[in-house]
Image (cartoon, helix red, strand yellow):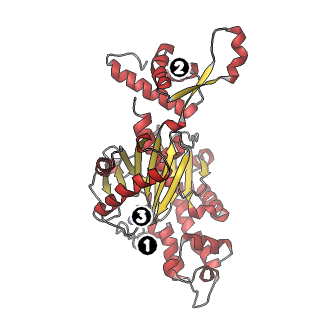
Amino acid sequence: MIEKGGNLPLIKQKNVSLIKKMVYRYSPISRSEIAQRLSLTSPTITTSVNPMIAQGLLRELPDLEERRDMERSPGRRPVKLEFVPETHYFCGVDLGPYGISYALTDLMGRTVATSTSTYTDMGSYESTMEMLVESIPNFIRAAKQPKNKVLGVGVVMPGLIDGAAGKINSTFRSGWDGHFLAQDLSEKIGIQVKVDNNVRARIIEADLFDRMLLGDPVAYFYVSYGIACHLMINGSALYGEFAAAGEIGHTIVKQDGPLCTTCGNYGCLEALASEKAVLSQCRANLYYNGVPNVLSEICSDPEKLTIEHVLEAQRRGDQTVGRILNGCIRYLSAELANVINLVSPKTVLVDGRIFSVDQNRAQLLDETRTLALNIGKERTRFIFLPYDAYRGARGAASIAVKEFFLENAL
Ligand SMILES: [Zn+2]
């Protein structure tokens, strides 16, 4: 159906993009399976696939399942197709709240190099750009990959990021709003750049690189220094007006609650249940009535306290830390139940360091299931993702794969 119509070059481009996506998701896959899944004819598949084989982008593998049938149809050469992962590389950069992480992946999302750096200053847009113009080529060089094999760079950060325009609508960094980061960076490093929200990119990573069968819709519940819940509906990440979808951390859950230092309102979920909130409550309780406790034995300096210290104290039975986390997870569970009632996701992906503790995972699951409407809690599947410091950077690489490889006919 797709191949009929008046605008042939455009239709051909669309077909090539559809075929690439099909091979990406289901490889190794035979030509006949592609034809069947996309309702395209064999000649259309051949016309699109042959140039990619000639370029060395696609390779043919013997189809072991069909080999048995060979005697019945001699002359047929049963093969399956897959991409050659080393033909292109993608660089992902995660401008996170604690530092910057980099990941270089091959075409199929296998990580070939990683790196992290802390911020020398939580700098201006201009100084961060200068730093990236140096650090990205250095990282690619250190990974021993020629720059011309890097097809694209993805950059992600928290905030309202318009991926299509490559523009930062709004972020917590002062003076960054309104900048066209994708274009600015691309001009300086000579590689095409895609930008997006850090959590929206993580859904793309799960979908493309991990090839998770997520169903539809998908909710990605992310608890870090901030909190976000991004959605994928009909295979597309939801942006909403001004790219502001997913900012669940700034929904008000307690009107007389604490000040949210990110948005200036009171009682945001982020001010009550994020890592930032956990750390602030733990700092206030580092010495209970002046008496040392498990947490203060692990880290005695409130300035140096990290979420890892807090979780270690919880694992070692610090009761006050346990109570603080329990309170935060109660808010998170109620909010997640609200998401389930609002969108009825097929799958909820849960990502956050606090869920590396079994007890926290179990509490979120139990309370969310208790609070969500019957139909939602029965049908929604919960997947807790193991904590991975480079998931954000891999997400950044995955948005570059999607934009510059899969959506592109070349
Ligand atoms: Zn807020």
In the rendered image, which quarter is residue 4 located in?
Answer: top left
Q: Ligand 1 near label 3 (Cβ, under 8 Å)?
A: no
Return the x and y of residue 136 as percentages of the image width and height: 40, 53
Return the x and y of residue 342 as percentages of the image width and height: 48, 49
Q: Amino acid at mark 2?
A: Ala
Left or right? Give the position of 148 relative to 391.
left
- The residue shown at (63%, 75%) is 313
10 Å crowding of disc 3: few (<14), some (14-19), many (20+): some
Left or right? Give the position of 185 relative to 295.
left
**Location of the C terminus (image quadrant):** top left
Q: Which residue is mark 1?
A: 257
- The residue shown at (50%, 58%) is 115
How far apart are the two marked residues, 3 and 1, measured between alpha carbons? 9 Å
Q: Amino acid at mark 3?
A: Ile
Q: Are marks 3 and 1 in contact (CB under 8 Å)?
A: yes
Q: Which residue is mark 3?
A: 252
Rendering quadrant holding ligand 1: bottom left
Return the x and y of residue 277 as percentages of the image width and height: 48, 71
Q: Amino acid at mark 1?
A: Gly
Q: Earlier in the sequence, mark 2 or mark 1?
A: 2
10 Å crowding of disc 2: few (<14), some (14-19), many (20+): some
Circle number at residue 35: 2
